Image: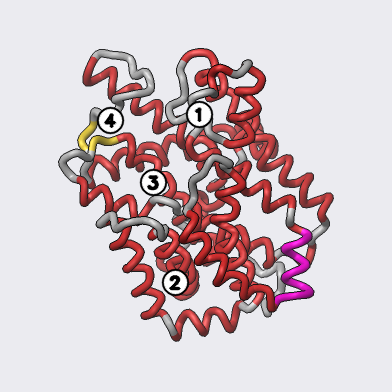
Amino acid sequence: MLKEDKFQQHIHVFRGVAIMLIVGAHTISALNWSDNQLTMRIIDALCNESSIFFFFIAGYLFQHLSGRFRYKTYLEQKLKTVITPYLLLSIPALIIFTQFVDRVGMWPWFYDQPLWKQVVLFLLTGKHLAPLWFVPTITLFYLIAPLLLAIDRKRPQLYWLIIPCWFLSMYLGRGGPYGPIEKAIYLFPVYLLGMAFSHYRQQAEMWVAKFWLPLLIVTLMGMVGHALEWPMPPSYLMIMKAPMALLLTVALLRWHGVFRHRLDYIAHVSFGIFFIHAYFISAIKVFTVYLITGHVYAGRDGDVLPGNLLFFIAYAAAVLALSLLTIWAAQKLTGKNSRMLVGA
């Protein structure tokens, strides 16, 4: 095993790739794909649920850095760099969706609740802004960190739980009325897979390099199932992206030098991008709706731009660029405190 303090450049690059795919996933719904449904489904298969990659990376890095683990320090650090920016960056969305516009997709009884309950439910589920479900979900993993570490240090044979848990995730899917709890169950096998990959790194790299073709076939089967809308369950994106995470890890280990340091800043501020990019998706949508129709976007019928590969790339690139510019400005203005404000 490598020393715990050895920097994992290929995992760093993987984080940059993952966040760009996540930005792409949340951009898809901003466009009108009525004339390009198959293109949309293929792009959606590539980008959607790329949070699976983030959870794999999180598990990998948790195990990789576990030699210095102290639970109290760990929770304090997560409170500072994850929970605090989550609360601060939630404020605009909470104001908008409790005072001005009803959030689409909420429970029928939600807006019958008093204001404080609406705020609490939004924060507990992350439903106030599409990507923010990630924080309540990953927080559950933070809370059970000692249990996960006990598996890694004392009962590594329990890593075999990855296989039945993966099949369970494929059957259950990601959705459900209990929000973060169901998403945590869904993502548990890939978090554990990341930990196991780090724990058995040399063997895992050899195994993936040897069996890359079966892993690729499973990945492509999942992609085709999602793109062609085969009946569910299973969850084709889970079928696709768990083995894809393994393939990308080994591929980037070999070829991350192709990227050199071009993705370093994106990877470094990836968590900040995760926090704020949805605001820019909405801002561009409001601007384009007004520009094209003359009406103010009010939460529905905002997909006025045609859905095709060119518009998709341009829209996602604009969102990514604006997110990076905002984070860069926050870092320049607030220094080290930027991690508490924008998560980077």
Toward which corner of the image does residue 6 lie, by quadrant? Answer: bottom right
Q: CA distance from mark 3 to mark 4?
A: 15 Å
Compare residues 23 and 244 and report the one nearer the observer: 244
Query: Vertically, is 36 above or below 216?
Result: above
As drawn, the label of residue 25 is 3
What amino acid does circle 3 point to?
Ala
> Are circles 3 and 2 on residues that touch, CB within 8 Å?
no
Residue sitting at x 40%, y 41%: 26
The percent coordinates of residue 14 (x first, y second) are: 49, 61
Q: CA distance from mark 1 to mark 4?
A: 23 Å
Q: What span is colored magenta in the figure? A: 146-156
Compare residues 90 and 223 and report the one nearer the observer: 223
- Magenta part, dominant SS: helix
> Are circles 1 and 4 on residues that touch, CB within 8 Å?
no
Toward which corner of the image does residue 221 lie, by quadrant? Answer: bottom left
Q: Nearer the viewer, mark 1 or mark 2?
A: 1
Q: In the current view of this chain or complex, which residue is farthest to the left?
A: 35
Choose the circle earlier in sequence order: 1 or 3: 3
The local crowd at label 1, few if under 14, some if 14 to 19, many if 20 or more residues have their Cα within 10 Å, is few
Choose the circle earlier in sequence order: 1 or 4: 1
As drawn, the label of residue 107 is 1
Choose the circle earlier in sequence order: 2 or 4: 2
Choose the circle earlier in sequence order: 1 or 2: 1
Q: CA distance from mark 2 to mark 4?
A: 34 Å
The residue wearing badge 4 is: 303
The residue wearing badge 2 is: 247
Residue sitting at x 61%, y 42%: 135
Query: Vertically, is 230 above or below 109?
Result: below
Query: Vertically, is 210 above or below 8?
Result: below
